[in-house]
Image (tube, helix red, strand yellow):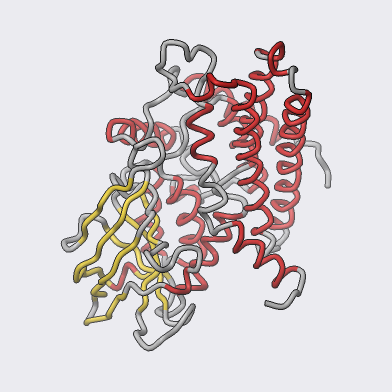
Amino acid sequence: MDLAFTKEQRDFRQEIRTWLAANAPAQPLQSFDTEQGFQQHREWEAVLNEGRWGMVTWPEELGGRGCDLIEWLIFEEEYYRARAPLRVNQNGIFLLGPTLMEYGTPEQKARILPKMANGEEVWSQGWSEPNAGSDMAAIRSRAELVGDKYVINGQKTWSTRAVWADWCFGMFRTDPESERHHGLTFILVPLDTPGITVRPIPQLDGLPGFAEIFFDNVEVSVDNRLGDEGAGWRVAMATAGFERGLMLRSPARFQETARRLVELYRENSATADHDPAVKDAVIRAYLDAESYCLTTYQTACRLSQGGKIGAESSTNKIFWSELDQNMHATAMSILGARAELLPLAPDAVGVGSWLDGWLFAQSGPIYAGTNEIQRNIIAERMLGMPR
């Protein structure tokens, strides 16, 4: 693998850096798990889109720049280095967007992607159900085709961003006689449709980052089906591959956390060095973040040559989720008792957002498919071990 960037790539990096320096918010936005913060992030998505930075890998006619994956990784590196706001529409632009590129009709792409890029329509996930968490093949929510509409009944839970989102995407069982991964269909649902009830679920920090969605005879046009009827599992696995692999968690996110961790250690080395294991953990975090970056560049090069993301996306998911936990646990050790202070507490100088990051990191081994399930996938599909 050639690690040298071309002149065009270096120029691209400088263009991003210059634009972000001029446009990124000077102060952090409020959490997008609050109503006001959600709106602030939606407005930031519009600013990004005006600069044609909403999703750089999309075709130019759909608001993107037609960039390849290497350029996307460069963009992510500069975005996180500038400490620009997290993307409130990440379920849309990083997960559904690439899936639409692969399975969507021209009409669906033209109708959905531009509004997704500018933040006008924010997307939530409709995967998990009360009895179908990591085991998505156990989905029981039904969608019955009546004329040119699907009539949906059932419940989704742990739907990220659903409290204030405009749409959700998910799988529904369209063949009532089917079992497991057969007879499922991928459907896009406007959350303002009559018959939908959204109930917030508080996170560890008390904010409603998730929600339950109840469907009571909800009518959705058949035009909102993504892919063929009954082929929902194949479409969803493409989305899950993006979630576990490249798109949802770029290496730049963890590289920036690792840089912040090094800064935190240097600011507190006098006390942190009382435990030699802390310094070792900081070094390991930095090395692991760089290793993940190099592996991702290797994967991007393979994909650009016609390869596919397969079961190895499960190894990515385990690695980045556990890396995130380890980095934040190390930060908690460095801060000691102060780590439990909220950022606005009188004695919280220098604490930053580490507590919030640590709380969120605990969800990493769960969302995008639990790490236990990912290890089963690795054992069976990559190593050929028996079930």
Pick the front one: 199 or 296: 199
Q: Is residue 349 visible?
A: yes
Taking the view exactly as shown, the residue that stands out farthest to the bottom is 177
Q: Quadrant of the C terminus?
A: bottom right
Q: Is residue 115 visible?
A: no
Check the image and report above or below for 226 versus 52. Answer: below
Q: Count up the numbered dots.
A: 0
14 with respect to 198 (left or right): right
187 with respect to 262 (left or right): left
- Rendered residue at 45%/33% (across/down): 51
- Rendered residue at 67%/44% (across/down): 70
Residue 279 falls in image quadrant: top right
Pick the front one: 144 or 302: 144
On the image, the x and y values in percent for residue 61 come to 45, 50
Check the image and report above or below for 11 versus 292. Answer: above
Check the image and report above or below for 44 versus 180. Answer: above
Check the image and report above or below for 166 versus 26. Answer: below
299 with respect to 139 (left or right): right
Taking the view exactly as shown, the residue that stands out farthest to the right is 1
Residue 14 falls in image quadrant: top right
Pick the front one: 335 or 16: 335
On the image, the x and y values in percent for residue 346 come to 42, 11
On the image, the x and y values in percent for residue 135 come to 50, 68
- Rendered residue at 83%/47% (across/down): 1
On the image, the x and y values in percent for residue 232 come to 45, 73
